[in-house]
Image (cartoon, grey):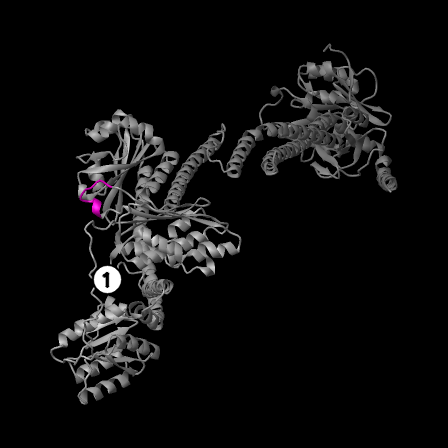
């Protein structure tokens, strides 16, 4: 009886999964960026910023997008109503690295990857968590890279870069991630 | 071990085991329950901690949607074998990763609400997965409780084991410990049972160690001591009571004072006991002293040492005796402190304590009971009380003895009097009967006597043989007359009319030998029995003063008795003896002339010898009257003589009569010469017996008197009156006393009425009795007894007519 019941439960679950999955799967790109948007937001949970990263207590937590925004409204939807350490979340979009002056997480869009060294130089010494999902191997200096692996988004974290930015990455974040780079930087 | 001891032990054991068992059970249960709950809580807590950790480690995996990582995190649960299911859910409730990994991901489609709970033997926990303040998802954990139950089982097993061990230990301990309580209680119970079953209150129960039990034992022992004391007190009281009872009874069985006192002292010496006991009597007449009368048998040696012996007179001074004779029980606990001779005497002999108990009858002390013991303070109040009671009983018994003695004396007196009266009455009846017989016999023999006397006196030409025969007849008649007269008089001490004459005993014996020859010679000879008679007569025997016929009768009687005593024959000795006495003032009245009648017959035993003189006592059955020896005794008394009987069974009998010898001066009897000289008288003779009339008339006729005989009283009176009125009166009337219709008294009265001067002579068979009783009827001038003796008749006629001669002279007529 029990196996039968269990079997029955399984089939129900499977059916539900199948019935839900197709629309998500259908829009691969937005689905990918919805995931990445969530990831961006989630980084705020696993990374500690030094106190000087915020001017005053009321200063909001800023997630910046440098370059062409691939998220659409996904990211805004994700952060809507959320807070990080009692700070409100603000999405800022930059087209130039110079625009940013008070940013905590910076998503470097693919469009700007070519300017990566400048960007990194500009951000040098500042506590900004840099995230990129651009393909290509030469992306050293980006703290967290979002890479696709077998249809899943995986993380590559450059601990040295983060350290250089005085950011403390939770070990928890390191667990599912791939550590890249070395202790240099 | 007795059956009654089991319950207490069992009860104690049960109590102890039950207590420890229940305590253990409660403790174990509590412990198990506590452990179970605690452990469950611990398990829950552990699961929660685990969940926490897993959840914490799963945040990134959830956040960055890495199921592999999540699975890896979950795989850490391998170490926790009791986790059977673990599932991570995303925040929207979608199963994300499962453990064990081999299983399809979603066992539970959506996570249950947060929290941990026990459900159906499992511990279910849903842990939120939170990073910062953000919920990433849920962790579902399902753990079985095998460990908890395993632990509970182990605990229960251990508890059971511990219970068993504890109970065993408790049993051992209880066995040992309960003894501390049960053993003394059982010992106590045994002792108590012992005491009650053996009734031995001198036992003491052992004192157990415990305080209360010790107290109980002490109390019980105390109680026992009290019971024993009470019992022994009761016992001693009972003993005393018993002693009192026995003494009282022993005393009650005795009737004389010495024996009562001896018994009393004997009991006291043996059973109270006392070391010295004596009884002194107190006579109020001699108020200055008491006299020791009885000393206890065992007290004799001590009494000797005390210098006390029977009849010792102990003066009463101011010592205890004075108080005792005043009726008080005196106890001297230490005589050494009493400075008087009597107590000091005891002190010197080592008797230190002394009790003097008065013997009181009707508030009068008649004696003192003295008891002593060597120790000072030797008597206690119980002893004194006992002695007081005892002395009362003894006094009472003594008093009763005295009363009994007095009563016995009175009774004996009464019986003796009664016996005497009875005897007298018997003799009186006999006397009356004898008088009647005597009267008739006297009448009957009167003619014989008259004719014999007349023949001897007047008949000429009598042969010697005839004369001898007539004399013998005359003597026999006299004896008959004497005998019949004595028949009614033998009991008299001394017949006043008895004529004492000089009697020669030797001559009497010769007469007796002749008179009794038929008895001792002829009759026995017919049976072939030979009795040899041996007269042994003293030649110088003096005469004695006495009644010849009485003595002759007595001797005849004795000869008869002797013959009766020798049915096989033997020797009969008749002996006379004169005892020569020194002349002196007393000698004259001392019986010194002895007559002995001795036989060689069967003899008498003591009883017979003692009673043989009693009237009517006979050993001869129908043949004997029992009067023989009684008459002999009567004779002896009348003669102031002595009678001695020597006899023993088979030795023969000797009867000795001892008489007083007659005075040496001879008293000659004045025989009035036969009335030859008297004048011839005209006489009237009145009698109802023709034979007598005839014989008297003839005898008087022969004397020359004119005798008119009248037959009967009335005829006599008629004849006298006729003669008196016709001028030929009688000069004397002789009348019989006893006659039908008109007796001699009436005749006499009639004669005196007609002619007072005419003498009346009463001739009677009753004569002796009338004389003896000094009863001369009125109108009678002289009484003569029958059979009349011619001489006496003549003398009376002469005497009476001489008085009246002048008054009525009668012309003399010579007739013969």
Category of crowding for the residue at label 1, using alpha-carbon neighbours closer than 10 angstroms: few (below 14), some (14–19), many (at least 20): few
Name of the residue lying farthest toward the top: A184
From the viewer's perspective, is B140 left or right of B654? right
- Is residue A100 shown above or below B368? above
Pick the quarter of the image with the C terminus of chain B. Answer: bottom left
Of B521 and B64, the residue lying toward us: B521
Of B462 and B49, the residue lying toward us: B462
The magenta segment is B581-588
Q: Report if residue B76 lies within the magenta region.
A: no
Name the image quarter holding residue A47: top right
Of B495 and B428, the residue lying toward us: B495
Name the image quarter holding residue B305: top left
Name of the residue lying farthest toward the left: B806
Q: Which residue is mark 1?
A: B496
Q: Position of residue B760 (x, y in %)?
A: 21, 77
Q: Position of residue B183 (x, y in %)?
A: 56, 31
Q: Report if residue B585 lies within the magenta region.
A: yes
Residue B275 seen in render: no
Q: Position of residue A17 (x, y in %)?
A: 85, 38
From the viewer's perspective, is A122 left or right of B407? right
Label 1 resides on the chain identified as B
- Is residue B756 shown above or below B652? below
From the viewer's perspective, is B227 left or right of B170? left
Badge 1 element: loop
From the viewer's perspective, is B159 left or right of B574? right
Name of the residue lying farthest toward the bottom: B726
Pick the quarter of the image with the N terminus of chain B. Answer: top right
Q: Residue at x 20, y 29 (%)?
A: B341
Q: Residue at x 38, y 38 (%)?
A: B267
Q: Identify the main secondary structure in magenta.
A: loop
Counting the numbered discs, the total is 1
Of B372 and B31, the residue lying toward us: B372
């Amino acid at each position: 009886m029990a196996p039968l019941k269990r079997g029955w439960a399984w089939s129900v679950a499977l059916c539900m999964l199948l019935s839900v999955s197709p629309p998500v799967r259908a829009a691969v790109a937005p689905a990918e960026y919805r995931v990445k948007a969530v990831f961006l937001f989630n980084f705020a949970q696993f990374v500690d910023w030094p106190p000087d990263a915020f001017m005053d207590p009321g200063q909001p937590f800023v997630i910046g997008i440098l370059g062409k925004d691939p998220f659409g409204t996904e990211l805004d939807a994700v952060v809507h109503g959320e807070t990080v350490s009692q700070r409100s979340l603000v999405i800022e979009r930059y087209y130039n690295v110079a625009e940013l002056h008070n940013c905590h997480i910076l998503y470097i869009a693919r469009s700007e990857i070519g300017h990566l060294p400048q960007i990194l130089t500009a951000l040098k010494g500042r506590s900004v968590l840099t995230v990129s999902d651009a393909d290509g191997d030469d992306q050293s200096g980006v703290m967290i890279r979002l890479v696709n692996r077998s249809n899943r988004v995986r993380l590559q974290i450059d601990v040295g870069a983060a350290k250089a930015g005085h950011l403390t990455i939770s070990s928890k974040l390191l667990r599912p991630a791939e550590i890249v780079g070395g202790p240099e930087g | 071990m007795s059956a009654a001891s089991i319950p207490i032990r069992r009860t104690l054991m049960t109590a102890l085991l039950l207590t420890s068992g229940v305590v253990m059970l409660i403790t174990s249960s509590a412990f198990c329950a506590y452990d179970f709950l605690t452990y469950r809580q611990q398990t829950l807590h552990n699961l929660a901690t685990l969940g926490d950790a897993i959840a914490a480690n799963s945040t990134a995996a959830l956040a960055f949607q890495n199921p592999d990582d999540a699975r890896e995190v979950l795989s850490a649960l391998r170490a926790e074998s009791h986790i059977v299911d673990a599932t991570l859910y995303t925040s929207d409730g979608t199963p994300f990763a499962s453990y064990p990994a081999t299983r399809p991901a979603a066992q539970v489609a959506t996570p249950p609400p947060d929290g941990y709970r026990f459900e159906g033997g499992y511990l279910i926990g849903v842990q939120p997965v939170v990073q910062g303040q953000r919920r990433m998802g849920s962790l579902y954990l399902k753990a079985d409780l095998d460990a908890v139950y395993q632990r509970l089982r182990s605990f229960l097993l251990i508890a059971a084991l511990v219970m068993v061990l504890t109970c065993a230990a408790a049993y051992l301990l209880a066995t040992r410990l309960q003894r501390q309580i049960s053993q003394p209680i059982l010992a106590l119970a045994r002792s108590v049972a012992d005491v009650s079953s053996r009734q031995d209150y001198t036992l003491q129960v052992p004192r157990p160690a415990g305080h209360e039990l010790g107290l109980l034992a002490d109390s019980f022992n105390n109680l026992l001591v009290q019971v024993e004391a009470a019992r022994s007190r009761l016992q001693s009281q009972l003993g005393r009571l018993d002693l009192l009872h026995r003494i009282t009874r022993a005393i009650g069985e005795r009737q004389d004072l010495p024996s009562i006192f001896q018994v009393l002292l004997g009991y006291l010496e043996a059973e109270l006991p006392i070391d010295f006991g004596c009884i002194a009597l107190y006579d109020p007449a001699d108020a200055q002293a008491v006299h020791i009368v009885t000393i206890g048998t065992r007290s004799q040696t001590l009494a000797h040492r005390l210098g006390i012996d029977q009849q010792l007179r102990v003066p009463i001074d101011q010592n205890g005796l004075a108080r005792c004779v005043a009726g008080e029980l005196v106890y001297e606990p230490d005589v050494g402190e009493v400075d008087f001779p009597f107590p000091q005497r005891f002190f010197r002999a080592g008797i230190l304590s002394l009790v003097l108990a008065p013997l009181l009858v009707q508030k009068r002390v008649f004696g003192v009971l003295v008891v002593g013991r060597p120790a000072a303070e030797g008597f206690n109040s119980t002893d004194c009380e006992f002695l007081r009671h005892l002395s009362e009983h003894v006094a009472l018994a003594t008093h009763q003895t005295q009363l009994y003695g007095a009563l016995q004396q009175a009774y004996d007196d009464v019986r003796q009097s009664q016996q005497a009266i009875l005897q007298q009455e018997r003799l009186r009846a006999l006397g009356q009967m004898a008088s009647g017989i005597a009267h008739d016999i006297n009448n009957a023999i009167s003619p014989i006597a008259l004719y014999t006397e007349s023949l001897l006196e007047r008949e000429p030409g009598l042969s010697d043989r005839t004369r001898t025969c007539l004399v013998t007849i005359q003597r026999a008649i006299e004896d008959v007359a004497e005998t019949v007269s004595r028949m009614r008089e033998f009991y008299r001490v001394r017949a006043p009319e008895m004529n004492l004459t000089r009697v020669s005993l030797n001559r009497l014996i010769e007469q007796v030998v002749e008179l009794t020859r038929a008895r001792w010679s002829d009759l026995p000879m017919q049976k072939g029995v030979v009795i040899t008679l041996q007269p042994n007569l003293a030649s110088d025997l003096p005469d004695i003063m006495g009644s010849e016929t009485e003595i002759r009768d007595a001797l005849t009687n004795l000869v008869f008795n002797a013959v009766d005593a020798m049915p096989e024959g033997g020797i009969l000795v008749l002996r006379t003896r004169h005892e020569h006495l020194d002349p002196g003032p007393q000698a004259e009245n001392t019986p010194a002339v002895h007559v002995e009648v001795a036989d060689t017959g069967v003899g008498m035993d003591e009883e017979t010898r003692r009673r043989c003189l009693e009237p009517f006592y006979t050993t001869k059955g129908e043949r004997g009257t029992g009067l023989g020896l009684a008459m002999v005794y009567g004779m002896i008394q009348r003669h102031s003589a002595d009678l001695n009987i020597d006899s023993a069974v088979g030795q023969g009998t000797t009867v000795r009569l001892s008489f007083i010898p007659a005075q040496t001066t001879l008293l000659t009897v004045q025989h009035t010469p036969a009335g030859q000289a008297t004048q011839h008288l005209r006489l009237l003779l009145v009698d109802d017996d023709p034979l007598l009339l005839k014989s008297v008339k003839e005898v008087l006729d022969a004397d020359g008197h004119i005798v008119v005989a009248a037959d009967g009283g009335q005829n006599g009176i008629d004849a006298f009156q006729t003669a008196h009125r016709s001028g030929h009166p009688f000069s004397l009337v002789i009348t019989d006393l006893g006659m039908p219709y008109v007796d001699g008294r009436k005749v006499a009265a009639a004669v005196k009425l007609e002619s007072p001067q005419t003498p009346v002579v009463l001739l009677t068979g009753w004569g002796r009795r009338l004389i003896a009783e000094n009863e001369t009827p009125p109108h009678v001038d002289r009484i003569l007894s029958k059979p009349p003796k011619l001489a006496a008749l003549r003398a009376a006629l002469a005497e009476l007519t001489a008085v009246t001669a002048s008054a009525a002279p009668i012309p003399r007529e010579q007739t013969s």
